[in-house]
Structures are given as C-alpha cells and as structure tokens.
Amino acid sequence: MTATEPVRTPPDDELPPWREPWRNGGVVAVFRSPRLVWQFVRAEGRDKYRGTLLGGLWAYSKPLTRFLVYFLVIGVLLGLSRRVLNFPVYIFSGVVVLQFFTASLTSGTKSLAKETSLLRRVNIAREFIPLSMVLANVRRLRPAMIILVGAALLTGWRPRHVSGFPEAIGGMILLMVFVSGLVMITSVANMYVRDTRYAVESVIMVASWASPTIYPWNLIAERFGEHSWISYLYLSNPVTIAMFGMRAAFWEPTVPLRPTGFPDDPLEPSGVLALPLIPVLMSIGIAVMTFLVGVLVMRKHQHNLLLRTEWTP
Amino acid sequence: MSSVETETVRLTKVRKVFPHPQIPGDGRPRLRRQTDHAKDTVALRKVTLSFHAGQGTALLGLPEAGRSTLLHLITGVFRPDRGHVLVRGRVSGLIASGAGFTGDWTLRQNVEASSILLGEPRNRARAQVETILDFVGMGDRADDRLRELGPAETKKLAYATALHTQPDIFLSDDELVVGGSELREASLAMLAQVPTSGRTLVVTSNSAKLLPELCTRGVVMNAGVVDFDGGLQEALARYRELRDEHRSHHSPNEDDDDDEPDRPGPDDAPA
C-alpha cells in the first residue's frame, strides 16, 4: 500500500457500536450458540478408541463390567437379588445415571485446564468448555442406554411402557443442571489448585454410595425412618432423583405392581412421583442453586484464569 | 489516507499487570492472597492509543515491551486492570491461529471449525475452506486427518486459516508471512488488502522489509508505554535506536528480533 492510494474508509455511522472486547456474553452466549456447543461436543472424544482392535465396542465394556461386578457381588453373593425383583435392570438403571454423573464431573473438572491454549487465543465465553463437556457425556450414554433397554426388553419391558419416561427425562435434566453447576465451580477451582481434580475423584467415590445405585432406597428408610431428615437429605440428592426416574421408566414395568415388587419391602416407592414431595423440591432447589453459583463463579473468575498459569503474552 | 479517520479501537489510560504466577512450573500453588507485588510484571502502564479504519499500524518494540498484551486486550482475552478498551466491529486475525484444531478431524473440518472460532460467520467459514486449502497447496488433502500433517504444515494451515478471516479489526501477533517465497508474496498481498479495503490493521513486527508494504504508521512501545507514535520510517529508526541501546547493555549475540532480519537493504528503502 502506498500513501497515495485511495482508501475507502467506512463512514462513522456504518460501523457497529463501541463495545468492550472482554465482555463475551457468558452463559447466555452458550445458550445462544447451540451450534458452537455442538462443535465442542463433537470435538470431544472423537476417535477415543483409535488404534484399538475392538474400537467403539470398548464404550460398552465399562458399563457392562461395572454391571457384572455389582450383579455378582451385591446381587448374588450378598443376596440382594432375592430382595429386589429383576435386580439386574434395577442396578443397571442406577449404573447408567451414576456413570453419567461421575464421567461428567471428572472430565468437566479437567476441561478448562485442558483448553488453556484455546483460552489464550480467543475470547469465547469460558462456560462453553465445561458445559459442552457435560453434553458430550450425555452423548456417551448411548452404549449404556442400549444395554439397559436390551436388558429391560429381555425381562418384560415393552416399548408401550412409556408412562415413566417423563420422570426419567425430568430426572436426567435435573442431574444435568446440577452437574453443569458443579463443573463450572470445580473447573475454575482446578485452574487455581490442581489438587481439585484429585479431591473430586475422592468425592465421587463417596457419591457413588450415597445414592441407591446398587442397594434399594428402603435400606435407608428402614434404618433412619422414611420421613427422617437423614432420609430427606438422602433423597434430595439429584443423582438419587435421576435414578428413581430411570427406574420408573425401565425397571418398574418389568416387575409386578408394588408392594410386591419388593417382597419384603412395601416401603420402596415406585418412581419419583411416589417420593415425599419435600425432598424432591429440595433436589430441584439444590440443582438450580448449584447452577447459579457456578454461573457466578465463572463470571467472577473467567478473566483471571490465565493469570494463574505460567503464561504471559 | 482518507482525510477523515474513523476510529475503530480506542485505549484510554490502560494498565495491565500480570501477577506472579500462582502455579509456577515446579513449586506449589500459593493460596493466600498475594501481598508481595515485587515480582508482578507490569505489562502496560497508562497506554492511550487509537487505531483507525483504513490504516495499517505497526507496533514496534523489544520483547516484553507490552505489544502482545496490548493486542490481547483488544481481542478481549484479557481485561484491563485500569482504563478502558473499546472496539467497533469484530476482532480477529493472525493472533489466534490454530484455535480449535483437533488432530482427529480432517483438514476440511479443522479449517471450518477454526474459522468459526475465530469469529467468521458459519456460511463464510464453509465457503472459504477450499480457498484456504488451495492457498497452502493442500487442496487434494482435504479429507486427510490433521494429525497426518507435519508440524510445519500444520502451522502453515493454521496461518492460512487465520489469514483468511475478514474481521473489521485485523490483528497480527505472529509471523507476518510463512512458507516459501510464493506463499509469502500471496500472504503479504492479502495482508495489504486489509487497510486498503477500509479495515483496521495492527501488526506486531519489527521488519523493515515487510512493514512498508502494509503500514503507514508506526508505534514504538518500550517497557509498557508508548515511546513513539508517528510515521513508519521514523518509528523504525526509533526502534533501531532502542535495540542498539539494548544490545550495548546485553550480550551482542542475543537475538531480540521476532521477524525478518530488519536492517534495511537496498531494495526495501522507503518509497
């Protein structure tokens, strides 16, 4: 370019208004750009099993192994399968939920630290990264859901049994809101102290026993009383609610109506709707609050994240 | 230059400090709020600058003069500690090359995804894929996986993707041109089109060879402040002064230039 060349400069009123470049829309931007979210979801875990002989079949192995171990040890050895009818489907519907929760939480916690090179380059809303990780894990549920539906079909579930679906879908949405809030908090914390991801792994160990994955809820009810505050606290866990929902959809239709579904335990409620209302409302409150706290944490810290690492431009 | 200059980027008394890293490479992170600020890096102190549509501006300076921080404030990756940064229009360019590249994806998918992350509208990102791949001579490899490329080729592709973005404000914090002489020519021509088409161009470079083709204005930064702001040739002269001063204090072999060898040769004398 030489100084004499004519330049077409846009007149003042043709240009967009002034804006502060660091403002990136935050969590609102995520909801406004579903296609960009989809781009992140697709980028995550593509070709995860590259170079393996069995390839995508490995996606089935983790839920299947977990299921087999629980079934043999808890069901057969400890005798719980005599206590709960159609125990395989009962535990597997819990395992599906638990797997989604633990996988989302672990991968979501690491997500921001993994993507620092992207964060250094473009100022997209940071929320995209942990939130799309949660969605990527919804997508990864497919193998486990196929196994679950297969097992339910073998034991008497039929496609016309859809009355529990709203509970299952509602429960999973509740869990997604909850875990999205959690990963927004833990992924930011992980940028400050990398101990977070190890702490999260320990918490997950506890969490997997704090919901009725492999034992029926009425063990808690029997021990502490159905309407005690401990029981309510236990029930207000969104993971627990999601499990009840999943069971309403796939397990209940396979067993005779309660109370006979549990020969010894008339207390076991069937589905979320049979639970006391207070803990269900509490779990919704917990999920929404966690999400809001996550949004605030992200908003407060998103421009400090890079300053905590060794990098300056 | 047009007689009326339209301001598109405005920095007012901008200050940016980088705290001493909380997670140093080896040590343990410190939890307590930092009270000792002696180790903080003050990258910019009270910088007031404007950039204009239809103008190419070179940011010259030694390493750590604050040029890169300045550009990252304009892209919004950082927020100023004090002062204001305002922009009009979309910001992108050779500052985010390679954003969103995924080894498992094909070249086509990578170019498209990266363009979108760099802010290109989706339909334009899709339409540009072939042009970009042809630009670096990889048109026949569109369906190869990115991981099959060597590092030099990956870099070239990332560069071309960023070069083909059409933001209102085009920034460059990387090498201005890469690859062989043919590609360099073509790249330079594309960069030169940014100001002539009425958009804003800001590049960090010290290259006396390349800059006259792109910029009419030069801003010399030194230790976080604007040291000189004016014509490009004067700015280049001021930069050389600074560099020689710096070299006389340090070992003479120390290489502090980020671009081409920038002694003006016979062919890059000012027009």
Image: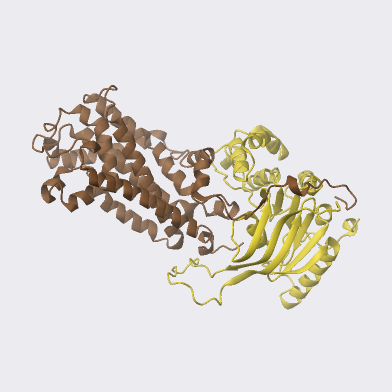
Query: Where is residue A277 shown, x and y percent of the image?
Result: 23, 43
Report which colour depicts chain B. Answer: yellow
Give me the residue at 79% from left, 59% from top: B207
Q: Is residue A125 above or below residue A141?
A: below
Horizontal arrangement in the rendering, residue A97 relative to residue B118 (left or right)? left
- How many labels, in total? 0
Colouring scheme applied when the structure was drawn: by chain
Q: Quadrant of residue B250?
A: bottom right
Residue A269 at least partly seen: yes
Q: Quadrant of residue B210?
A: bottom right
Q: Is residue A250 above or below residue A20?
A: above
Horizontal arrangement in the rendering, residue A122 relative to residue A103 (left or right)? right
Query: Where is residue B249 shown, x and y percent of the image?
Result: 73, 78
Query: Where is residue A91 shown, x and y percent of the image?
Result: 23, 38
Query: Where is residue B137 shown, x and y percent of the image?
Result: 71, 38
Viewer-proximal residue, B81 or B112?
Answer: B81
Viewer-proximal residue, A18 or A243?
Answer: A18
Viewer-proximal residue, A2 or A77?
Answer: A2
Give me the residue at 30% from left, 30% from top: A165
Name the quarter where the C terminus of chain A is drawn.
Answer: bottom right
Which residue ends up furthest to the left in the rendered image?
Answer: A264
Residue A62 at least partly seen: no
Horizontal arrangement in the rendering, residue A68 relative to residue A34 (left or right)? left
Report which colour depicts chain A. Answer: brown
Give me the residue at 43% from left, 54% from top: A187
